[in-house]
Image (spheres, coloured by chain):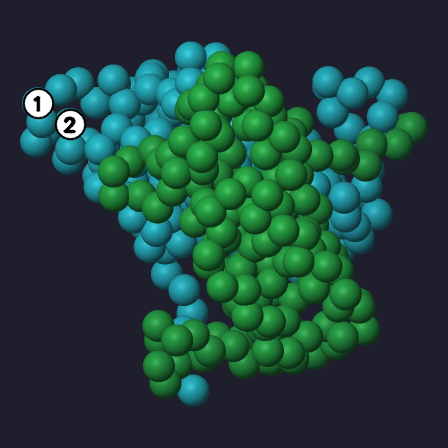
Chain colours: A green, B cyan
Amino acid sequence: MYYQVVTQCIHNLKCLDKWLDKAEQFSETKKFDVNVLLNARLAPDQRPFIYQVQSACDYVKGAAAWLSGQMPPKHPDNEQTIGELRERISKTVAFAEGVKEAQYAGAGERKVSFSWAPGKIMSGADYLLQMTIPNTFFHLTTAYSILRHNGVDVGKMDFLGSINLVDA
Amino acid sequence: MYYQVVTQCIHNLKCLDKWLDKAEQFSETKKFDVNVLLNARLAPDQRPFIYQVQSACDYVKGAAAWLSGQMPPKHPDNEQTIGELRERISKTVAFAEGVKEAQYAGAGERKVSFSWAPGKIMSGADYLLQMTIPNTFFHLTTAYSILRHNGVDVGKMDFLGSINLVDA
């Protein structure tokens, strides 16, 4: 299930690319600099859209790495343009999709540590449930909400992407 | 893993109670009717806070029911007050927590159908990954973001609730 959950997170992260397309189209139609959207936030003490994308990427990258027993590759938070955000998503997806299902063997028993919690660890099982899932979708939804609040025409199906309905 | 994922969704749904406390405190301090927050939204064509709570509840209720082979109990969307929203959360949690781990046996092979997709079904595995997880956290984050945008002092740890860090 570790592989399946991370794969789902990758799927929803990829949906972000379409939201970026819509943000770009909206800025062209309304004739404003798309960087206004990239630096927008919903509250003055909230981090902006760029950070939400970086953070969503990092929770997906972290899950794929820690749960398969690897160190996550370093992706510096230096994106400033929509093109650079696309690259951040792209390299995150490339890394996470490169982890094969078999590499998640024993994921639940792995120990995950955090720079902000010295001397503490979390089991891989708790990490997937309590960190990966809530945080990935928290930052994805926050990124989506910043665009939605600013008038970009994103809707629920853009958030979900394709779903696997089959004939009954 | 079905039981564990639904349990995590229940955990984050319960966190909503604390956000409601903070919303109530904020409305008292600033001397406005808390119903203003309950009817707030981030975009004119988005559904308001009340709906986001109802919808988060329904995805948790639906997962607990469909994945354990039960019909979900009917919870009419008639909440108008903060007390009624607390009751909606409470009865959702009571139902979902009442489903025991053993009842999720065979969850992945169950067939889930939707009123909006006649003649179509989704497997229990796809339902958990593609519907339950993204939608539960989408609506929880949207509810949180509506409060955050309106000045309620909610933060990331209010969203996550307790996490299981242990000594290394």
Q: Which residue is mark 1?
A: B31
Q: Is residue B100 visible to us here?
A: no
Residue A92 placement, left or right of B69: left
Residue at 75 percent across and 68 percent down: it is A99
Along the viewing direction, whichever of A116 and A79 lies nearer the viewer: A79
Residue on which disc 2 sits: B27
What subunit carries mark 1?
B
Q: Secondary structure at mark 2?
A: helix
Q: Position of residue B21 (x, y in %)?
A: 23, 38
Q: Which of the pair A141/A37 is nearer the observer?
A: A37
The Cα–Cα distance between marks 1 and 2, rounded to whole angstroms, is: 5 Å
Q: In the image, residue B84 lies at what x, y percent? A: 33, 24
Question: The N terminus of chain A lies in which quarter of the figure?
Answer: bottom right
Q: Residue furthest right?
A: A167
Looking at the image, residue A138 sits to the left or right of residue A155; the answer is left
Q: Quadrant of residue A43?
A: top left
Q: Residue at x 35, y 29 (%)?
A: B146
Q: Amino acid at mark 1?
A: Lys
Is residue A22 visible to the viewer in this orientation of the structure? Answer: yes
Q: Is residue A103 above or below residue B151?
A: below
Q: Position of residue A65 (x, y in %)?
A: 63, 71
